[in-house]
Image (tube, helix red, strand yellow):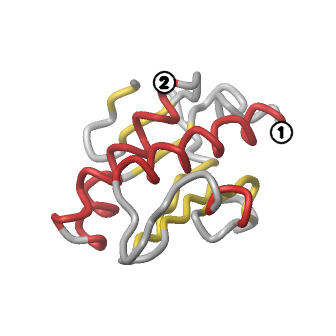
Amino acid sequence: MVVVMKRYALKLFISLKYITANVVDRNNGNIVATASTVEHALKSTFECGRSCNAKAATIVGEVLARRLKVEGLEDGQGRGIHIDMNKEVGKKGLKNHTKVWAVVNALKDNGVKIILEDRGDNI
């Protein structure tokens, strides 16, 4: 029997004005990498105005991917970064579905190993 440790998890916070993506170490609860539209360096690269869109979410995902690579965690130390899409989309509401997928796809496109927990698929 193979036991898969789900050590690293992607957690998202999406409001009308901000998008924040954190990778959390489930062993100790610490955030190991983060990216957010709140950051001055990111905020100046796009105009959110009254709301952040999927383009802003993509940039957050790209920056998070780079930070994971710097930390040597782009593959979750061989196990991948886990995300429960049903939970993330459910708590964000259906209208934020594209923003959630924009972050996930940006991570994947930048070499981060993503494991979707709701289906158990590796992408």
Q: Residue at x 63, y 48 (%)?
A: 7
Q: CA distance from mark 1 to mark 2?
A: 18 Å
Q: Residue at x 41, y 70 (%)?
A: 14
Name the one closer to the observer, 6 or 62.
Answer: 62
Q: Earlier in the sequence, mark 1 or mark 2?
A: 1
Q: Amino acid at mark 1?
A: Glu
Asked which quadrant contains residue 86, the reply is: bottom left
Query: Residue 18 location in percent, x, y?
Result: 48, 72
Q: Residue furthest right?
A: 71
- Asked if one can make out residue 25 in the rendered structure from this viewpoint, the answer is no
* Kind of residue at disc 2: Asp
Secondary structure of residue under mark 1: loop
Q: Nearer the viewer, residue 34 or 19?
A: 19
For residue 71, the mark is: 1
Which numbered tag is attached to residue 41?
none
Give residue 49's position: percent from left, percent from top. 42, 72
